[in-house]
Image (cartoon, rainbow, N blue to C red):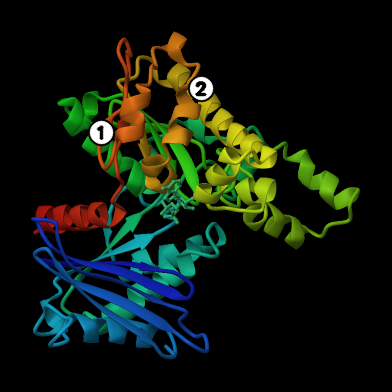
């Protein structure tokens, strides 16, 4: 079954076409700078070991034009793999916020679209473009069953004592202010991979999943279910991120406003776009920061210490929340590639049964276990694959339904 996974942003459409259930990637690409003066399309067709790439710079008027170009590329004689857009039978859309309405992957109906629209107040930058992507795909891929896969869904199993904030009850009951969490598709994917590596059913696995990309979050997974997570109502709290602060004293916001006269919009921008590693070092790419630290840059060294100390605190907290843990999982750009961050994050946790093998940690590529002798916990590095997870969930849903 040809399954198209679509991730629509405010000015971009990222996609992968899979042959399911095998999970083979047939094409992938990124259509970006939609609506800007100059748009850009990068499309790759995979055939066995060969990859054929198409690149083009031209204005892309709007998302509808972008989606039509995508259909054109999928059916192109040279770069495509389909005879017609009608061969796409299934479209899996990444939707950031499902609120409390969506605890699982869902076939898209008019009512589902309305709910996604109503949830825009919780994810103003993401849900509206996600919905646009759905509407455009419905027009262009008319034969496909459209399915929504929510970033928040995996965390709908959090118990109430974990998802409620200690503010007046009406803010939860009347306004839905609570922990939702994000990166759920990634946490779920690596948890399933970890279960396979541990040779146990997921429902018997206790895991701490550490997703370190530009955005970063951790999930406490007990018996295969998320019981706590570090992002909250929004993707701002928790770990130190590329440009987001993670946890801070909320009263800093009042201080910035009352004593420094910063307007709320500026504070919002500061905490989301100018903080985290960027605020501490001027850079948000960890490769640069690690290289600077290596050359003796004190700010870069301190930033890495703050970044990894935060991860360490959450490991401790989640071990307390879960009970006996089978494995830690490092994933996403930084987690998969930075041996330095992994080592700093777990060093000094030997008393908790966490012992890293420095050589294995340096040597690992792709998937691997970097735990050392005497470690009670496995320390896994697992490349995430959110697109494949979306395709699998969409496929499983329509096949169960059909
Ligand atoms: P996103 O959250 O945008 O999906 P990714 O999971 O791709 O992000 O992670 C991107 C981040 O991964 C980059 O900001 C970069 O800091 C980091 N990264 C990628 N490769 C390496 C590497 N070899 N060493 C350290 N960090 C890396």
**Residue at which label 1 appears:** 368
Asked if residue 73 lies left or right of residue 122, the reply is left
**Residue displayed at 35% across by 61% down:** 94
Image quarter for residue 34? bottom left
Q: CA distance from mark 1 to mark 2?
A: 25 Å
Given residues 301 and 20, the one toward you in this image is 301
Nearest-to-viewer mark from 1 and 2:
1
Secondary structure beneath label 1: strand
For the C terminus, the image quarter is bottom left
Q: State the count of labels.
A: 2
**Quick check: 269 above or below 113?**
above
Residue 109 horizontal/vertical position (percent): 29, 68
Q: Are marks 1 and 2 in contact (CB under 8 Å)?
A: no
Residue 26 visible somewhere in the drawing: yes
Image quarter for residue 49? bottom left
**Residue displayed at 48% across by 35% down:** 341
Residue 165 visible somewhere in the drawing: no
**Quick check: 170 above or below 359?**
below
Q: Earlier in the sequence, mark 1 or mark 2?
A: 2
Secondary structure beneath label 2: helix
- Give the residue at the far front of this rendering: 295
**Residue displayed at 49% across by 28% down:** 345
**Residue at which label 2 appears:** 317
Asked if residue 379 lies left or right of residue 88, the reply is right
Crowding at label 2, few (<14), some or many (≥20) Cα neighbours within 10 Å?
A: few
Image quarter for residue 48? bottom left
Residue 82 horizontal/vertical position (percent): 11, 80
């Amino acid at each position: 079954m040809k399954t198209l996974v679509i991730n629509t942003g405010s000015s971009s459409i990222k996609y992968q076409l899979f042959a399911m259930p095998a999970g083979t990637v047939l094409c992938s690409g990124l259509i970006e700078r939609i609506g800007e003066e100059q748009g850009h399309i990068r499309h790759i067709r995979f055939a066995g070991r060969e990859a054929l790439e198409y690149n083009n710079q031209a204005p892309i008027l709007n998302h509808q034009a972008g989606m039509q170009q995508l259909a054109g590329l999928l059916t192109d004689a040279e770069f495509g793999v389909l005879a017609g857009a009608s061969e796409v039978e299934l479209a899996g859309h990444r939707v950031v916020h499902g609120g409390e309405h969506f605890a699982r992957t869902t076939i898209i109906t008019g009512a589902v679209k309305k709910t996604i629209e109503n949830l825009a107040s919780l994810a103003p930058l993401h849900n509206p473009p996600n919905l646009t992507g759905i509407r455009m795909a419905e027009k262009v891929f008319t034969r496909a069953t459209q399915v929504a896969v929510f970033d928040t869904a995996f965390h709908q199993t959090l118990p109430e004592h974990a998802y409620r904030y200690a503010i007046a009850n009406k803010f939860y009951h009347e306004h839905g202010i609570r922990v939702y969490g994000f990166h759920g598709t990634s946490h779920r994917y690596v948890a399933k991979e970890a279960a396979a590596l541990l040779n146990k059913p997921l429902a018997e696995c206790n895991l701490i999943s550490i997703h370190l990309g530009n955005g970063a979050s951790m999930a406490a997974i007990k018996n295969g279910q998320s019981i706590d997570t570090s992002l909250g109502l929004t993707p701002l709290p928790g770990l130190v991120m590329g440009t987001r602060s993670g946890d801070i004293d909320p009263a800093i916001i009042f201080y910035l406003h009352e004593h420094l006269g910063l307007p709320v919009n500026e504070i919002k921008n500061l905490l989301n776009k100018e903080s985290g590693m960027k605020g501490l070092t001027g850079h948000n790419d960890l490769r640069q920061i690690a290289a600077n630290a290596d050359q003796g840059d004190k700010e870069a060294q301190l930033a890495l210490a703050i970044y990894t100390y935060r991860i360490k605190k959450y490991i401790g907290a989640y071990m307390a929340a879960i009970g006996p843990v089978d494995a830690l999982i490092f994933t996403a750009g930084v987690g998969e590639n930075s041996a330095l961050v992994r080592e700093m994050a777990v060093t000094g946790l030997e008393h908790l049964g966490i012992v890293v093998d420095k050589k294995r940690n340096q040597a690992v590529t792709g998937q691997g276990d970097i735990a050392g002798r005497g470690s009670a916990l496995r320390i896994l590095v697992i490349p995430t694959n959110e697109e494949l997870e979306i395709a699998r969930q969409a496929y499983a849903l329509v096949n169960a339904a059909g």
